[in-house]
Image (cartoon, helix red, strand yellow):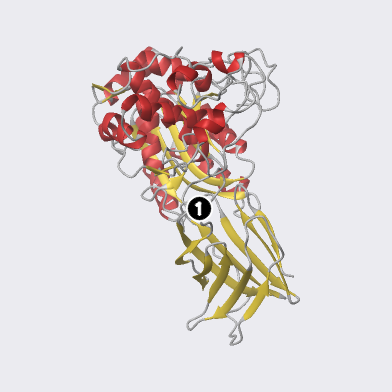
């Protein structure tokens, strides 16, 4: 631990500069195995795919990459619940400045929004309870177009606050509302001024509620490099290159176990037992095995901080079984880490550099570049996302133009043959984001091809975890919108 601490202190000068893995005590072969594991575990089909990652050791970036057609190192990507740790950090900034008391009652902060009759449990709800997901509220998820603060306060608080963990993204929305009320600023502006500018986060943005308040528990978008900077700030206990951004007291409170957690089993009572969801919960951070903690978003949006190893791993992905992503870190990286530098390995370093440069998800396979002149079109069965019809028109040079009728009207995007082609699509019409909505315009990267007996098109929405997929065979269409709140798609 003395060696790790000394290296950490030395790395504070020149944070986030690139370095060879071996210079930071990591074999390049281990990172190659990590990449192999990512690609073997997640097949870019129904299991989803990794989109990008950054590995930092002793404050140095030792490996980073993104699988084309994604470019998560430079372009923002949705975070889902990873957003919660940023909202928590905004509360931390207020606490450090004496602008909020964690034991302050929510009914006092929102005295003008409380219902006429305040239940005993609601009256006892504190900021601290929101941070630890010990709210005691029955209903989950604000979705409607009304006032989300008033809706939250009108819910049934069936359990005494502070007495039991229940994951609740609505609680984090309330934290975002508190940040704006206490700071007198928009939350993202407050974070930008007091944190992001100091640590080099420049592209962050968020979706909001109908009242213009950040969703808080979801909705933020950043690059993977920016997530790694956030993780390094917490690894350095709130210090950034000698400048204090967050107090070390806040970092300790936020990242240590404040409450027992458990995705289905709240009864785990010994650290290390159970899964990475049963190690306890801090202030909108999850505890992990191996003495680590993480910011965590659906689909595999992670910033994993491993203090005992002086390491940060950040990642974006679009996965179903995303707990396996953590196992890839534990199994491939942790066992081989050394405190002291290793002998340089130019051969392995070159192999790693070549591999990182060529990371890619293969376009849709095709048996031949078939010439076709007649478009085909399908009306779709009623589905949860409101997709009405889809049409495929051949285009010069191969590929097609896909026309999809959504709630937002007729949308067109190109798909290449043997390559990904860029376009855009609008799916939902709302200007606020209930969890799982896809508001606004999204960049698409799509490919298509004819295989024996049919036609296949896939379109990634590259700032998100989602994709569209269509398969035409024997005159019928099947497919899916793979996303939170996604759906199967079938022709009538």
Res 342 visible: no
Residue 137 shown left or right of residue 33 in the figure: right
Name the residue tied to disc 1: 430
Task: Name the residue rendered at 40%, 22% in the picture.
Answer: 339
Between 236 and 440, the residue placed more toward the observer is 440
Is disc 1 placed on a helix, strand or loop? Answer: loop
Residue 186, x across and y down, in percent: 34, 35
Between 208 and 472, the residue placed more toward the observer is 208
Residue 200, x across and y down, in percent: 28, 37
Q: For the C terminus, give its image quadrant.
A: bottom right
Task: Name the residue rendered at 44%, 47% in the picture.
Answer: 77
Q: For the N terminus, give its image quadrant.
A: top left
Residue 312, x across and y down, in percent: 42, 30
Question: Quadrant of residue 54 in the image?
Answer: top left
Residue 77 shown left or right of residue 328 in the figure: left
Residue 249 shown left or right of residue 200 in the figure: right
In this view, 183 is above or below 161? below
In this view, 219 is above or below 420? above
Between 133 and 341, the residue placed more toward the observer is 133
Residue 82, x across and y down, in percent: 49, 35
Disc tally is 1
Q: Residues within 10 Å of mark 1 (few under 14, many from 20)?
A: some
Between 31 and 50, the residue placed more toward the observer is 50
Task: Name the residue rendered at 45%, 27% in the picture.
Answer: 175
In this view, 81 is above or below 279? below
């Amino acid at each position: 631990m003395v060696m790790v601490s000394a290296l950490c202190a030395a790395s504070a000068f020149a944070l986030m500069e690139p370095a060879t893995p071996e210079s930071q005590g990591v074999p390049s072969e281990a990172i190659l195995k990590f990449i192999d594991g990512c690609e073997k575990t997640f097949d870019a089909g129904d299991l989803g795919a990794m989109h990008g990652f950054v590995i930092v050791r002793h404050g140095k970036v030792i490996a980073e990459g993104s699988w084309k057609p994604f470019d998560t190192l430079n372009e923002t990507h949705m975070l889902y619940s990873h957003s919660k740790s940023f909202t928590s950090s905004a509360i931390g900034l207020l606490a450090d400045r004496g602008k909020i008391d964690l034991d302050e009652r929510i009914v006092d902060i929102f005295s003008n929004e409380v219902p006429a009759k305040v239940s005993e449990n609601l009256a006892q709800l504190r900021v601290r309870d929101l941070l630890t997901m010990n709210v005691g509220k029955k209903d989950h998820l604000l979705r409607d177009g009304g006032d989300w603060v008033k809706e939250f306060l009108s819910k049934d608080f069936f359990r005494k606050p502070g007495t039991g963990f229940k994951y609740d993204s609505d609680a984090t929305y309330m934290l975002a509302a508190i940040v704006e009320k206490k700071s007198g600023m928009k939350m993202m502006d407050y974070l930008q001024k007091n944190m992001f500018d100091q640590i080099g986060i420049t592209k962050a943005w968020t979706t909001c509620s109908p009242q213009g308040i950040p969703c808080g528990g979801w909705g933020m978008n950043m690059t993977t490099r920016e997530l790694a900077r956030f993780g390094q700030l917490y690894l350095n206990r709130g210090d950034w290159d000698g400048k204090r951004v967050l107090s070390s007291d806040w970092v300790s409170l936020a990242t240590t176990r404040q409450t027992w957690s458990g995705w289905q089993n709240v009864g785990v009572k010994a650290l290390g037992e159970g899964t990475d969801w049963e190690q306890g919960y801090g202030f909108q951070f999850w505890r992990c095995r191996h003495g680590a903690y993480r910011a965590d978003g659906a689909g595999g949006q992670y910033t994993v901080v491993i203090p005992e190893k002086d390491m940060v791993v950040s990642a974006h992905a679009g996965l179903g079984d995303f707990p396996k992503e953590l196992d890839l870190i534990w199994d491939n990286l942790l066992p081989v880490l050394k405190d002291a530098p290793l002998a340089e390995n130019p051969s392995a370093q070159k192999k790693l550099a070549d591999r990182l440069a060529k990371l890619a998800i293969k376009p849709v396979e095709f048996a031949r570049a078939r010439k076709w002149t007649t478009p085909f079109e399908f009306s779709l069965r009623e589905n949860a996302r409101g997709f009405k019809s889809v049409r495929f028109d051949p285009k010069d040079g191969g590929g097609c133009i896909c026309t999809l009728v959504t709630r937002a009207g007729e949308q067109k995007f190109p798909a290449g043959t043997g390559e990904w082609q860029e376009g855009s699509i609008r799916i939902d019409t709302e200007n606020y984001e209930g969890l799982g909505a896809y508001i606004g315009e999204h960049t698409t990267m799509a490919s298509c091809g004819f295989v024996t007996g049919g036609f296949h098109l896939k379109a990634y929405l590259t700032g998100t975890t989602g994709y569209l997929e269509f398969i035409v065979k024997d005159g019928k269409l099947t497919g899916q919108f793979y996303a939170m709140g996604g759906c199967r798609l079938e022709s009538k």
